[in-house]
Image (cartoon, rainbow, N blue to C red):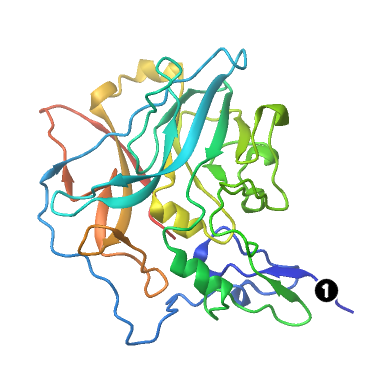
């Protein structure tokens, strides 16, 4: 006799499908074509853009506060909505991004608006981050949230008998988030798993957790990272259950770079000659705003690097080290 279990309907939106034992994974996901619209649904297309007219932005580096937790680097990072221009010939778009508090200038947060500042840490030296959610309570791509809630058959696949289906977020949540440090050795309570999500107004998913609860508000969570890894470039990104793809597409991603003092002996290019490249694909409406088309097709139509479409980098005749991250949506 089968045990009845809940089945979280997350479909193609990433980070949210939980399969009960014995159920084939193919039954839990939307088809590769996605396609919540009909065959004749018009798909937005980015207007023609001139290439190589915008300089490549370089994400700023967050500044740690070493006075809060002795022996660890501490950051406060806030998720906010802002405005960002992806190309000279596009208007500004609403975007989501991470902003880090500057302990030396508390009123001057560190960030671009889109994406997030780089967390530059040292191997085996722990990092503690308070993640704060100050995003709107209505989603930038609310039409997708509504489609999930209304039972779109490709975004909310139905669980096979004898299992029951459950939406990935409650009826009073349109936006919630949790940060996942991708690739590191991280304790489960700080891993940013989808069911640890929390909303801007303090609604928590069933497995929400935080370190040092006396130091957080309902829209915050504290996580700790061991940095017990070799020198490498990781990243952090949103992992909210039922809306991971939407949240990352809106801009919630950033670099997490682990350095090793031993690297200095290698003579690799450093400073301005070590260039991070965050690769993404995006589609834009004619007014410049982000167009989310992943419910209609796979992949977007415009390459974006560090938040700019077709940027250029002015270089000197010497060696550079390019640190490349594929941060495109799955």
Q: Which residue matches tag 1?
A: 4
Q: Is residue 151 above or below residue 197?
A: below
x then y, percent, for residue 293: 36, 69
- Label 1 crowd (10 A; few <14 / some 14-19 / many >=20): few
Secondary structure type for disc 1: loop
x then y, percent, for residue 30: 52, 75
Q: State the residue at coordinates (62%, 53%).
A: 194
Q: State the residue at coordinates (59%, 57%).
A: 241
Q: Is residue 300 above or below residue 271?
A: below
In the rendered image, the residue lying farthest to the right is 1
User: 29 and 244: which one is in front?
Assistant: 244
User: 256 and 44: which one is in front?
Assistant: 44
User: 242 and 80: which one is in front?
Assistant: 80
Residue 255 visible? The answer is no
Q: Quadrant of residue 162?
A: bottom right
Q: Quadrant of residue 262?
A: top left
Residue 69 visible? The answer is yes
**On the picture, is 248 further left or further right than 27?**
left
Q: Is residue 121 above or below residue 104?
A: below
Tell me how many marks there are. 1
Q: State the residue at coordinates (21%, 60%).
A: 287
x then y, percent, for residue 314: 12, 34
Q: Identify the image quadrant of the C terminus.
A: bottom left
Q: Identify the image quadrant of the N terminus.
A: bottom right
x then y, percent, for residue 319: 19, 28
């Amino acid at each position: 006799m089968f045990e009845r279990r809940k089945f979280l309907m997350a479909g193609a939106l990433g980070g949210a499908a939980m399969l009960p034992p014995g159920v084939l994974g193919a039954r839990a996901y939307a088809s590769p074509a996605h396609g919540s619209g009909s065959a004749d649904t018009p798909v937005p297309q980015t207007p023609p853009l001139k290439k190589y007219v915008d300089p490549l932005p370089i994400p700023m580096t967050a500044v740690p506060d070493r006075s809060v937790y002795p022996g660890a680097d501490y950051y406060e990072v806030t998720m906010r909505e802002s405005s960002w221009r992806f190309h000279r010939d596009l208007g500004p778009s609403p975007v989501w991004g991470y902003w880090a508090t500057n302990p030396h200038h508390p009123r001057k947060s560190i960030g671009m608006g889109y994406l997030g500042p780089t967390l530059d840490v040292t191997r085996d030296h722990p990092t503690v981050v308070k993640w704060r959610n100050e995003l709107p309570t209505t989603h930038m791509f609310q039409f997708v949230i509504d489609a999930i809630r209304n039972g779109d058959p490709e975004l909310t696949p139905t669980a096979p008998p004898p299992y029951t289906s459950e939406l990935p977020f409650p009826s009073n949540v349109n936006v919630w988030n949790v940060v996942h440090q991708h690739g590191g050795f991280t304790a489960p309570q700080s891993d940013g798993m989808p069911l640890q999500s929390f909303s801007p107004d303090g609604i928590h998913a069933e497995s929400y957790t935080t370190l040092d609860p006396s130091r957080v508000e309902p829209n915050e969570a504290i996580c700790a990272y061991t940095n017990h890894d070799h020198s490498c470039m990781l990243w952090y990104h949103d992992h909210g259950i039922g809306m991971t793809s939407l949240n990352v597409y809106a801009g919630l991603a950033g670099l997490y770079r682990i350095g090793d003092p031993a690297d200095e002996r290698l003579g690799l290019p450093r400073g301005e000659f070590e260039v991070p490249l965050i690769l993404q694909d995006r589609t834009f409406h004619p007014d410049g705003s982000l167009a989310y088309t992943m419910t209609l097709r796979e992949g977007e139509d415009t390459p974006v690097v560090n938040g700019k479409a077709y940027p250029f980098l002015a270089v000197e005749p010497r060696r550079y080290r390019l640190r490349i991250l594929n941060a495109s949506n799955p």
